[in-house]
Amino acid sequence: MRVLALDTTSPRGSVALLEGGDPRGEIGLDTGKGHSRWLLPAIDFLLRELGLRASDLDAYAVAAGPGSFTGIRVGISTVQGLALASPRPCLGLDVLDALAALALDTADTLVALRDAGPGEVYAALYDRNARPRAERGVRTLESLLEAVRGPAAFVGDGAENHRAQIQDRQPQALFPPGSTFLAAALGRLAGPRLAAGEGSGPECLRPLYLREAHIRKPPP
């Protein structure tokens, strides 16, 4: 199965093509210019370099969140457009699940977290097999660390950005290495689920928001 996977939920956006669960190519960009400018050219470049066309794909996978509100919409709308032009099953995935999969079997407790704004993180706890232990959500880093018992592995940009604070509260904390670009990890998660028939039409893709958007009404 050939799966095109996209992640635009953070400034580190990426596109990957996987075949039989193995990455054949991945493009990652760390840019603040907006994913809408580079995403389609990157997909086109990747497919051409691999000698493929959109019609050669079997399915699409996209990061549905949590993360940048605008980035999530760019990724989902791009997959929806591709799937409308070349109909294929689509699957939206949780970025925290992909992060946990990168730390598989490194500790009894895996903590996936990414920044959610000043003083807060998107976070979820998993067992060593990357199976969820608790409901994911937005919380302060302090409250998250209070919920972690025993040795744990922390993964994600939130783990790196708050490493000193985590180590201060959790001296035995582990920080397993992992790619900062997640498209290939998302594709590996998506493959078995798509093969099992979990994909759907593009109209069924929904963003995974763990908080309300911060939109201020203009003054009257």
Image (cartoon, rainbow, N blue to C red):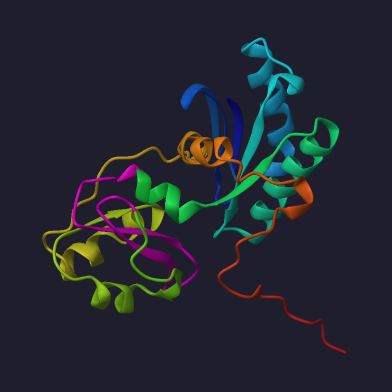
**Residue positioned 66% across, 9% down in the render:** 51
Residue 104 quadrant: top left
Q: Position of residue 9 (x, y in %)?
A: 58, 51
Note whether 92 is above or below 210 in the view shown: above
Residue 33 seen anywhere in this rendered image of the structure: no
Note whether 201 is above or below 109 in the view shown: above
Q: Quadrant of the N terminus?
A: top right
**Residue positioned 50% across, 69% down in the render:** 117
Residue 56 seen anywhere in this rendered image of the structure: yes
108 within the magenta span = yes
Relative to 76, is 175 on the left or the right? left
**Residue positioned 59% across, 36% down in the render:** 5
Q: Residue furthest right?
A: 220
Q: Position of residue 69 (x, y in %)?
A: 65, 61
Note whether 111 is above or below 201 in the view shown: below
Relative to 171, is 23 on the left or the right? right
Note whether 35 is above or below 162 in the view shown: above
> Magenta segment range?
102-130
Q: Nearer the viewer, residue 197 or 21?
A: 197
Q: Residue furthest front?
A: 196
Q: Position of residue 195 (x, y in %)?
A: 56, 35
Q: Residue furthest top?
A: 51
- Badge count: 0
Q: Nearer the viewer, residue 105 or 184?
A: 105
Q: Quadrant of the C terminus?
A: bottom right
Relative to 60, is 135 on the left or the right? left
103 within the magenta span = yes
Relative to 102, is 47 on the left or the right? right
Q: Position of residue 156 (x, y in %)?
A: 38, 52
Q: Nearer the viewer, residue 27 or 200?
A: 200
